Image (cartoon, rainbow, N blue to C red):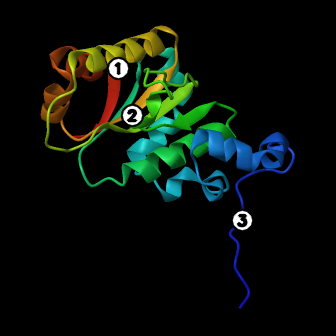
Amino acid sequence: MEQVIEKSVLDSVVHARLIDNIDSIAQTAKVPVHMLHKSAKAFLRPQEVDWLAKYRAHKASGKAGLCLMGVGQNVEVKMMAMAAALIRNFIDARVVTLGSMHNDSGEFAPPNPTVLLIPTFCVATEGKPLAAWQSVNIYSMLVDRMAGGKMTVLYVASWDMLRKQYGPTVADFVKNNYSVIGG
C-alpha cells in the first residue's frame, strides 16, 4: 500500500536551512519532525492560534508569555505544535519539562531560548509543594526571562494548584504578567 504524505508547510527556499538540519533542530527543540511540516492549526484551539499569530505583538507589550490553564488539554502536543510554528518563523523555541531543567550535577540549569515552553510547570498532582529553594529558582528564571524579553509558555492545571505548589508570589506573578487561555 502506498503511503500518503501530506503536503508540508515548509517552503524549500525560505526554510532551506531548517530542512537541511531538521532532525537536529527537532531534537534540540523537543518537537517531532512531522510537526515542523504541519500547521499548528491542526493541534490548537482558535485562541491559541491567535496568540501565536500575534506573538511579536505580545512580546512587544512586555508580557512574560502565555499560560495555558485547565486539565484535559493534551498540552504537550499543543506546546510542541506551538514550538514548531515558532521555529518555522525563525524563532528559537524549545519544549522542556521542569524535571529536565537540572544538569548532571543536580543544579538548576534551564535552557535560555527565545521562547521556552514548559508543559509540566504545574500539573494536577497530589503531594508536597516545592521546596522554597526550588520555587525561588523557578521564580527567578521566570522574572529573568521576562526582564530579558524572552517569553515563556506555561501549563497550569488551576490557580489553586499553582498557589499550592509555588506559593502566592509565583501565582501572582503568573496571573499579572501572562496572557491566560482557559481556566
| C-beta proximity under 8 Å, tags 1 and 2 | yes
At x 60%, y 45%, the residue is 84
Query: In whole angstroms, how far apart are the C-alphas of marks 2 and 3?
Result: 34 Å
Asked whether 157 or 103 is in front, the reply is 103
- Mark 1: which amino acid? Ile
Picture disc at residue 183? none
Image coordinates for residue 146, horizontal then vertical, percent: 44, 14
Q: Quadrant of the C terminus?
A: top left
- Mark 3: which amino acid? Lys
Q: Residues within 10 Å of mark 2 (few under 14, many from 20)?
A: some
Q: Earlier in the sequence, mark 1 or mark 2?
A: 2
Q: Nearer the viewer, mark 2 or mark 3?
A: 2
At x 14%, y 39%, the residue is 127
Q: Which residue is mark 3?
A: 7
Above or below for 182 versus 130: below
Local secondary structure at mark 2: helix
At x 15%, y 26%, the residue is 163
**Could you tell whether 88 is left or right of 151 in the image?**
right
| C-beta proximity under 8 Å, tags 2 and 3 | no
Q: Which residue is mark 2?
A: 98
Please, which residue is most extreme toward the bottom here? 1
Local secondary structure at mark 1: helix
Q: Earlier in the sequence, mark 1 or mark 3?
A: 3
Above or below for 80 versus 113: below
Q: Quadrant of the N terminus?
A: bottom right
Image coordinates for residue 13, horizontal then vertical, percent: 87, 45
Q: Nearer the viewer, mark 1 or mark 3?
A: 1
Image coordinates for residue 126, horizontal then vertical, percent: 14, 43
Picture disc at residue 138? 1
Query: In whole angstroms, how far apart are the C-alphas of marks 1 and 2?
Result: 9 Å
- Mark 2: which amino acid? Leu
At x 51%, y 59%, the residue is 42
